Image: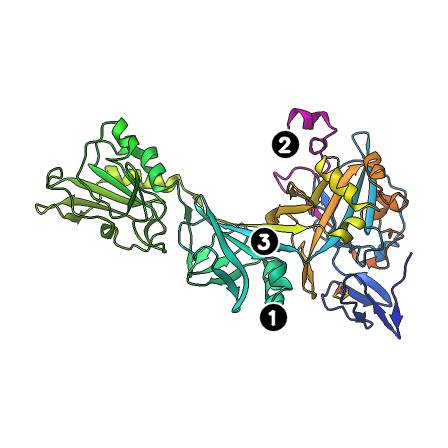
Amino acid sequence: MASPAREGDKIRCDACPVMCYIAPGRSGACDRYANEDGNLVRVDPLVIIEKTKAIGGELVPFLDRGAEWDGEIINTDDSFITAIGAGTTYPDYKPAPFIVSRQVDGVDMITVVTEGIFSYCGVKVKIDTDRHLGPERALVRVDGEPIGHVTTAEYGSQMLSLGGVHHLTGGGKKEGRVTCAALLDLCNGRPVEVAIDEGSTVVIEAGKPPIVNGVKEERMRVGCGSATVGMFASQWHGLVDEVVVVDDHITGVISEHQAGKVIGWAPTGIKIKGRRSTPGRYFQVAEPGTGWGGTNVDDPLVILGDFDPKVAKPGQSLLMVSTTGEQFAYYELGDDLKPQKQDMPDGLMKSVRLIEENCEPALCTVLFMGGAGGSLRAGVTENPVKLTRSVKDTLTRITCGGAPAYVWPGGGITIMSDVTLLPENAFGYVPTPALVAPIEFTMRREDYEALGGHMKHVMPLAEARAGKKAIQNDHVLAGQKGAASKQGVPWPTDERHFGWSKAAKKEPGT
Ligand code: SF4
């Protein structure tokens, strides 16, 4: 077993390039390692996911348990060792801190765990709102520092790309520090307020509604204006003469729309200011904003031109509504064919409520994204490219703190993981600056051997659970902590994840 270097009574941590010398009773710059009685201790507990139950979420100190394996055999597949609290492979010469074996349904399986130090990492954020948060490519800032940008919007959601190596290490010192702190908070499920150039302020918290300019977003739109017209056309027929669904992307007009035509909707002589795309579908009816349907409109009548006097009639009714049903208004044309606001008839109100009901709750989704570099892969195998191939061949499954990781096609190992599926406080940081994220590689023993795995360092899961230190480790663990397997999260060693299993052959893509 390796021992940390010493200078007087200080011990050196070499788990990242900062190489802290840590005095007795103190912790290093990242607060993840400490000098306890001359031992280098990884202070956060090793997290074990329990399939059937949580073990109370209590820290069980290894040091008090004598660190001796009592011979108890844990060959069942009820627990999974994560990399959270395990330590890293840095500075690259040593195998991953835990390489554990166990049997799963009669198959010898190996899991290699390590806390990866990710300089190339960031988060992709999906914010369910139609409101305009900022122009595409606008900078996203925290404390005035750029930490990312607005990227291409998706259906019903605005998207941000935050972090990445250029903000972490390519800008000023403060930019890197602020970016790293924001990423750490977002990945650990804490709220972060960002300000977008030429746009809004947004409080982002994974799994929670976004707060845009101080207002909590309630709903994600049911569809674009055109889709909403199509979905509700038959319910509106006979109740109102015209419906306009206001949307920054596609504003829908029912009397002109194909859905209205099919069910015999009569023309109304309405005129929409905007670029007509196809019948009943209009682009650019206003500027983007935080008003009706993600436009800058507070009074929807501003998007209308004059009604055609050859077609429109006094008394003709008009419903205008946004894509979430949050804004709505009812009008009747006066003798001058100008819309006059009236109380909404009960029958129409029901249809507006139906739009609201069909909207899903607005949420922020935060996906961690990182690239497993050479050092991380070297901790798994002496031949890193074989690990990449094994992952692509679905012989090796990657998880992040036990949560599923999507592996991007193409070269390298670039992963994405939903941060809400990981156990709490799964992420850490080092001041280089970089994020520390847990990553586990699980495969059959024979596949691990074939990819040049560190076979001499394999230990039974039971020994790791009992607190036995792997021979490659120069630090000790503070203890272990159980975390309940989250509902809906596939069990990491489930055989359907592996190309060799019959289940995977039946369910391609799992
Ligand atoms: S910053 Fe943390 S991981 Fe890096 S050397 Fe210091 S204590 Fe170790």
Q: Is residue 179 magenta?
A: no
The amino acid type found where label 3 is placed reads Val
Q: For mark 3, what is the residue? A: 123
The amino acid type found where label 2 is placed reads Gly
Pick out the residue farthest to the left: 335
Place of residue 314 in the rendered image (x, y in percent of width and height, measured from the top left): 10, 41
> Which labelled disc corresponds to residue 509?
2
Q: Which residue is pictured at 78% across the width and 37% down the height?
A: 443
Q: Residues within 10 Å of mark 3 (few under 14, many from 20)?
A: many
Q: Is residue 489 magenta?
A: yes
In the image, the segment drawn in magenta is 483-509
Secondary structure of the residue carrying tag 1 is: helix
Q: Decide if residue 75 is in sight here.
A: no
Could you tell me if the residues under marks 1 and 3 are in contact, i.e. CB atoms within 8 Å? Answer: no
Q: Decide if residue 318 is in sight here.
A: yes
Question: In the figure, residue 501 lies in which quadrant?
Answer: top right
* Depth order, front residue of 103/314: 314
